[in-house]
Image (cartoon, rainbow, N blue to C red):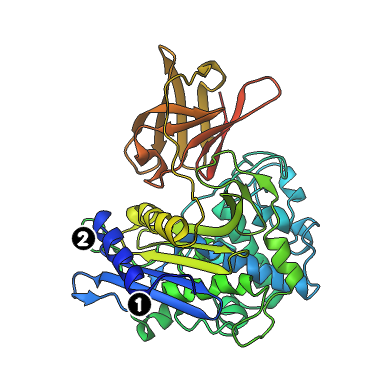
Amino acid sequence: MPTFSARALQDLCDHSREQHAVTGAQVAVFSGDGLLQAVSGTANAELGTPVTDDTVFQIGSTTKVYTAALVMQLADAGLVDLDVPVTRYLPGLPLAAGRQWREITPRQLMSMTSGLDNGPYTDTGRNDDAVARYIGLLADIPLTFAPGSSYGYSNASTNVSGLLIEALTGQCWDEALRDRLLRPAGLVESVSLFEELPYHRVAVGHVDGVVRPWCFARGCGPAGSSLATSARDLARFGSLFLRRGLAEDATVLLSADAVATMESPQVDVPARVFADSWCVGPYRKVWDGVEVFGHSGTTPNGSSCLLWVPTLDVAVATTVNTPHQGYPFADAVFDVVFRDWLGVAKPQRPVPGPGLETDVSAYTGTYDAHGVHYAVTAAAGTLLLDVHSTGAEKIHTELLPIADHRFLPADDAVTSHHTWDIAFTIGADGQATLLHNGAFAARRTA
């Protein structure tokens, strides 16, 4: 294990939870054959139940790495070619408006280069056809960009991966996840189906009281709406990549080649606070010359982050049930774990400084994604951003330059308190073609 103690990890978990006003939290660190976990706070304030080692938290989009691992299992079995159009496996099913969507490949779905819009957050029921019904909602939504030409995080693209898994396994995504990955990996504190929740200790969301309902849409399960796990199970999942595809009992769940593919950079991420590049499932960051892989996620009930570092043989996971504080909590934990305990200089969030200059004319205009409208204007050389999302209050903020085509919002509500930056992709004419709100991309419309 790294040179720190269970007591130190407990103190870090307690301090970070209190510092960021988190109701309940877990932190787990896996290294080699050992695992440490710390827990703190309350799982359900209405019942007064404490967080325990085996309490499960919704982990949100970190689920996407599990879905990618399932696709890579199919690739290992010769059932999927990552670089042929997904229409080979899902014939006759439109994925977007127009025709370019026919070019989308499984690799592009997992590397966030498909061009599919992020998509709706629509409840398509709790039956086993929920994912298929969700994909049926995409037919009239325009692509954000041509497949393979740029980066744009998309929940819809991962849900298409989930339908691909269903088509090739004959199982619904939840059953395939359980039978092909969770159980063989020994991840017994991980659950996605409502029917299995009574057999686990469950943390519910807390935002001005207990959050209801538990899950907003089973049809978005592959992208992260339903899977719940403990931090130690999440760290154990990360250890699968450290062992190059082997479960703890040496069962082969992924080939070493599949793991190498999942960790291979496919595209640069314009908003670098979020990640440096995207691989086939996880993101990639480079801290102090060290490659760090992982994913993070948030739902109305929980938030998580998983990082693994092959060169250090370490995986670190956090879970919380105060969703909007999940990323700040994880950042505080990682500051200490990586900088102080592992000796890796984790970069701090950039700060706008004096002397930074930018020509704002390239960015002004309107940008749209499904359910979200962005308006970028300028006043006296200062860039301003207005964001209107369906069902939410309009947000107005100043954009503060930190690097070429990158800005920090003065009001982090723009990024749902994920502490991301705002970036722009520039076209051949010198004008912005895409706005990137951290992970998510919107196409320029005027």
Left or right: 105 in relation to 156 = right
Quarter the C terminus occupies: top right
| x 60%, y 58%: residue | 282
Residue 99 visible in this rendered orientation of the protein: no
- Residue 180 vs residue 371, the one in the foreground: 180
- Residue 4 vs residue 154, the one in the foreground: 4
**Which three-letter amino acid code belongs to the residue tagged 1?**
Thr
**Which three-letter amino acid code belongs to the residue tagged 2?**
Gly
Left or right: 265 in relation to 133 = right
Residue 405, by quadrant, is top right
- In front: label 2 or label 1: 1
Q: CA distance from mark 2 to mark 1?
A: 19 Å
Q: Which mark is residue 209?
A: 2
Residue 416, by quadrant, is top left
SS for dot 1: loop
Left or right: 340 in relation to 223 = left
Q: Which mark is residue 397?
A: none
Q: Is residue 44 above or below residue 333?
A: below
Q: Are marks 2 and 1 in contact (CB under 8 Å)?
A: no
- Rate crowding at label 1 as few (under 14), some (14 to 19) or many (20 or more) other CA atoms within 10 Å: many
Q: Is residue 361 above or below residue 334?
A: above
Q: Is residue 178 above or below residue 140?
A: below
| x 66%, y 53%: residue | 111
Q: Which residue is most to the top?
A: 380
- Residue 397 vs residue 16, the one in the foreground: 16
Q: Position of residue 97 (x, y in %)?
A: 65, 43
User: Badge 1 is on which residue?
Assistant: 55
- Residue 101 vs residue 33, the one in the foreground: 33
- How many numbered discs? 2
Going from N to C along the chain, the mark reached first, 2 or 1, is 1
Q: Position of residue 398 (x, y in %)?
A: 38, 26
